[in-house]
């Protein structure tokens, strides 16, 4: 719509398949959140609800590792290292945000000091990195 | 006139940043605004996108436009418009539920989101396996 798929792949640094994977994970996650809120109401652990997102992060890391190894073997060493570093940075920031949010939801009493500004801070860092990358890609 | 990638990224970035800041302030009880007001950056951004889409679709009615490359493009634009409306429907019902205007179950609130995600996954799937499109 605002971006073509090619531009999105260039900007975000993820392959189309990885975007597909993360969208699928988001779909399953939203289904589980709706189930948790409407049906189970604290019967299901929040850690279980977040499993699709963690799984997508893990699979994406595995996929990136494979692609980077292939690139390295084909002599594109700089590209392989840069891709690996970028994707791992993005995924780790996303994972930190997910884990903190899950902890906040799962342990409401113990995690009272965990304020939302802190939970979302990895996303703020990610936004800055994406802006810098956009200037580079442009 | 087409915006450059940097301009489009900047537009998306500013609205996302403002929305995230307002969301965090609301969730941390620093501000007590209406949820519809918290979602204001989303409404503005969606309106801009809908206007841009409308202008593009109107451009197809110009006399010089080649109708042969039109069917696929028009289908794509129609899907984009539907996606925008689904997103708007999800955000509106979510705001109404958060504000307590309705007691609707979250499952019903999420139906537009699921439809949107399924559509986006289908679109991406066709891009991953292009030969199966026909």
Image (cartoon, helix red, strand yellow):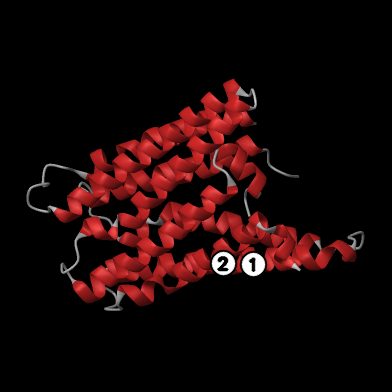
| Residue for badge 1 | B79
Residue at 36% over, 36% down: A92
Question: Quick one: label 1, few (<14), some, or many (20+) residues within 10 Å?
Answer: some
Side (left or right) of A113 relative to B113: left
Residue reaching furthest to the front: A73
Front-most of residues B126 and B55: B126
Residue appearing at x 85%, y 62% in the figure: B69
Check the residue under mark 2 and report the chain it is in. Answer: B
Secondary element at image label 2? helix
Quarter of the image where one finds residue A14: top right
Q: Which mark is residue B119?
A: 2
Task: Give how far across and how far down residue A129 sits, in percent.
Answer: 46, 31
Q: Are marks 2 and 1 in contact (CB under 8 Å)?
A: yes
Q: Earlier in the sequence, mark 2 or mark 1?
A: 1
Q: Is residue A81 left or right of residue B132?
A: left
- Judged from the image, the secondary structure of the residue bearing numbered disc 1 is helix
Relative to A23, say whether A15 is above or below: above
Q: Give the mark count.
A: 2
Q: CA distance from mark 2 to mark 1?
A: 8 Å
Determine whether, in the image, residue A53 is placed left or right of residue A37.
Answer: right
Is residue A23 depicted above or below A62 in this figure?
A: below
Asked if both marks, 2 and 1, belong to the same chain, the answer given is yes
Instruction: Give the percent coordinates (x, y) of residue A96.
Output: 30, 40
């Amino acid at each position: 719509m605002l971006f073509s798929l090619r531009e999105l792949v260039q900007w975000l640094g993820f392959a189309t398949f990885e975007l597909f994977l993360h969208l699928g994970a988001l779909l399953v996650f939203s289904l589980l959140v709706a189930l948790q809120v409407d049906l189970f109401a604290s019967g299901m652990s929040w850690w279980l609800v977040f499993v699709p997102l963690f799984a997508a992060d893990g699979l994406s890391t595995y996929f990136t590792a494979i692609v980077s190894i292939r690139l390295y073997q084909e002599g594109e060493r700089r590209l392989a290292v840069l891709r690996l570093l970028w994707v791992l940075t993005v995924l780790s920031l996303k994972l930190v945000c997910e884990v903190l949010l899950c902890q906040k939801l799962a342990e409401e009493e113990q995690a009272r000091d965990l304020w939302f500004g802190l939970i979302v801070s990895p996303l703020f860092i990610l936004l800055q990195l994406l802006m810098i990358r956009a200037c580079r890609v442009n | 006139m087409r915006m450059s990638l940097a301009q489009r990224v900047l537009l998306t970035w500013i609205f996302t940043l403002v929305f995230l800041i307002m969301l965090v302030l609301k969730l941390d009880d620093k501000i007590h605004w209406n949820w519809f007001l918290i979602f204001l950056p989303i409404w503005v951004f969606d309106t801009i996108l809908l206007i841009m889409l409308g202008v593009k679709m109107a451009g197809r009615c110009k006399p010089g436009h080649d109708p042969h490359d039109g069917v696929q493009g028009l289908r794509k634009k129609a899907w984009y418009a539907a996606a925008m409306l689904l997103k708007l429907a999800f955000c509106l019902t979510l705001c109404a539920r958060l504000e307590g205007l309705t007691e609707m179950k979250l499952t019903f609130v999420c139906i537009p989101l699921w439809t949107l995600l399924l559509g986006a996954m289908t679109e991406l799937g066709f891009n991953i396996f292009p030969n199966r499109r026909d």
